[in-house]
């Protein structure tokens, strides 16, 4: 047992977050995301929604300071539309990194980038487009 570690961060996920290097991405996706054929390791978090697991991940993961550090999936053919699930993901991200702008990618571009992530966390999120990539940064010296 560890102190001050979110209980959603089990041994497998916590070890993976610790092992990630600067500039590497992890994807947090909804239950409809085609993760099985995407390529990266899959971590299942079926009992929790996307914003909640994002909050747990960001409680320990330092974020990069560059462009596209946090990147949501756009609604197909409606890139400027912000669905409620996206607003929730943005709110969580901003609570951990108020200086950071959440960028967006078209679905095909998002899936390409997610296929190169260190892992894909599949959540129980029922709302479509509940998908975000976050890029690990460095700890201050």
Image: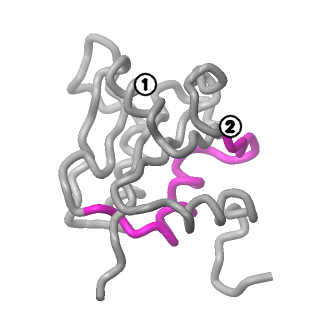
Give the percent coordinates (x, y) of residue 128.
51, 25
Using the rendered view, name the quadrant where residue 15 is placed.
bottom right
Q: Residues within 10 Å of mark 2 (few under 14, many from 20)?
A: some
Foreground mark, 1 or 2, reads 1
Q: Which residue is the extreme one toward the right?
A: 1
Position of 30 with respect to 89 (left or right) is right
* Secondary structure under the numbered disc 2 in the rendered image: loop
Give the spatial CA distance, label 1 vs label 2.
Answer: 18 Å
> Which quadrant: the N terminus?
bottom right
Quarter assignment of residue 91: bottom left
Residue 105 horizontal/vertical position (percent)? 28, 29
Q: Position of residue 86 (x, y in %)?
A: 39, 38
Apparent side of residue 43 relative to residue 141 in the rendered image (left or right): right
Number of marks in picture: 2
Residue drawn at x 57%, y 28% is 39
What span is colored magenta in the figure? Answer: 42-64
Q: Identify which residue is drawn at 36% across, 17% down.
A: 108
The answer to whether mark 1 and mark 2 are in CB contact below 8 A is no
18 horizontally vs 107: left or right: right
Residue 11 image point, x, y percent: 75, 64
Q: Is residue 62 magenta?
A: yes
Above/below status of 45 relative to 16? above
The C terminus: image quadrant: bottom left
Q: Is residue 40 above or below residue 139?
A: above
Judging by the rendered image, the residue that carries numbered circle 2 is 124
Tag of residue 111: 1
Q: Which callout, 1 or 2, points at the residue further toward the start of the chain?
A: 1
Q: 10 Å neighbourhood of mark 1: few (<14), some, or many (≥20)?
A: many
């Amino acid at each position: 047992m560890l102190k001050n570690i979110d209980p959603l961060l089990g041994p497998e996920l916590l070890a993976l977050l610790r092992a990630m290097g600067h500039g590497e991405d992890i994807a947090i996706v909804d239950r409809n995301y085609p993760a099985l054929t995407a390529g990266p390791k899959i971590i299942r978090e079926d009992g929790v929604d996307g914003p909640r697991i994002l909050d747990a991940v960001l409680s320990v993961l330092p974020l990069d300071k560059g462009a596209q550090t946090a990147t949501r999936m756009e609604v197909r053919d409606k890139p400027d539309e912000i669905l409620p699930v996206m607003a929730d993901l943005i709110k969580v991200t901003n609570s951990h990194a108020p200086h950071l702008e959440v960028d967006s990618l078209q679905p095909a571009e998002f899936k390409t980038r997610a296929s190169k992530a260190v892992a894909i966390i599949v959540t129980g999120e029922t709302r479509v487009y509940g998908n975000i990539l976050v890029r690990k940064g460095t700890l201050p010296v």
